[in-house]
Amino acid sequence: MDFAHKMLAFFPFPVGEIQTDHGIEFTYTFMPWVKKPHPFEELLKERGIRHKLIPIATPKQNGRVERSHRTDEKNFITSGDLESLPGGEESYLISSISTITSVPTQLWAG
């Protein structure tokens, strides 16, 4: 959530819409067992910002991010060092680690 606050403070204009993928760092859309609202979506709602989810299986709309994730995961697997991942955002690490280890996302939802 720290990233979202920094990002919103960075832009010198009001943000009206944010587009993301369906990752658990942004939404619980595909996690029906999670009954609480997602903190990221709650922040956007509080600020009157529309959250647009890109269509599933459309990597062209999210290609740069996906390529970055592949590079980061390769670096992590090669080095085993969490410091090699950029940003240090907890949600990013959870997403990357769950992808690397194939741990069910239910464990990360709490």
Image (cartoon, grey):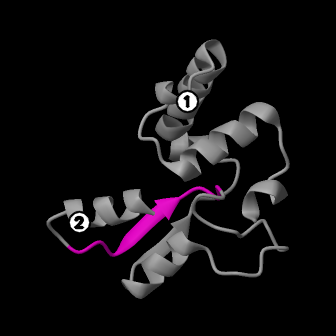
Is label 1 in contact with label 2 (beta carbons under 8 Å)?
no
Secondary element at image label 1: helix
Name the residue rendered at 64%, 80% in the picture: 37
Q: Nearer the viewer, residue 68 or 105?
A: 105
Q: Earlier in the sequence, mark 1 or mark 2?
A: 2
Q: In which quarter of the image is the N terminus?
A: bottom left
- Circle 2 packing at 10 Å, graded few (<14), some (14-19), many (20+), is few
The percent position of residue 40, horizontal first and vertical second, equals 51, 70
Secondary element at image label 2: helix
Q: For residue 20: magenta?
A: yes
The percent position of residue 95, horizontal first and vertical second, equals 65, 46
Range shown magenta: 14-23
Q: Mark 1 points at which residue?
A: 82
Q: Which of 18 and 45 is in front in this view?
A: 45
Q: Quadrant of the C terminus?
A: bottom right
Name the amino acid type tagged 2.
Answer: Ala
Placement of 32 over or under 90, stated as above or below: below
Placement of 3 over or under 53, stated as above or below: above
- Circle 1 packing at 10 Å, graded few (<14), some (14-19), many (20+), is some
The percent position of residue 58, horizontal first and vertical second, equals 63, 47
Name the amino acid type tagged 1.
Answer: Leu
Name the residue rendered at 52%, 47% in the picture: 61
Picture quadrant where residue 17 is located? bottom left
Q: Name the residue under label 2.
A: 9
Picture quadrant where residue 107 is located? bottom right
Picture quadrant where residue 30 is located? bottom right
Q: Residue 93 carries which label?
A: none
Q: In this view, does 57 lie to the left or right of 67?
A: right
The percent position of residue 77, horizontal first and vertical second, equals 66, 19
Q: Magenta region, mostly helix, strand or loop?
A: loop
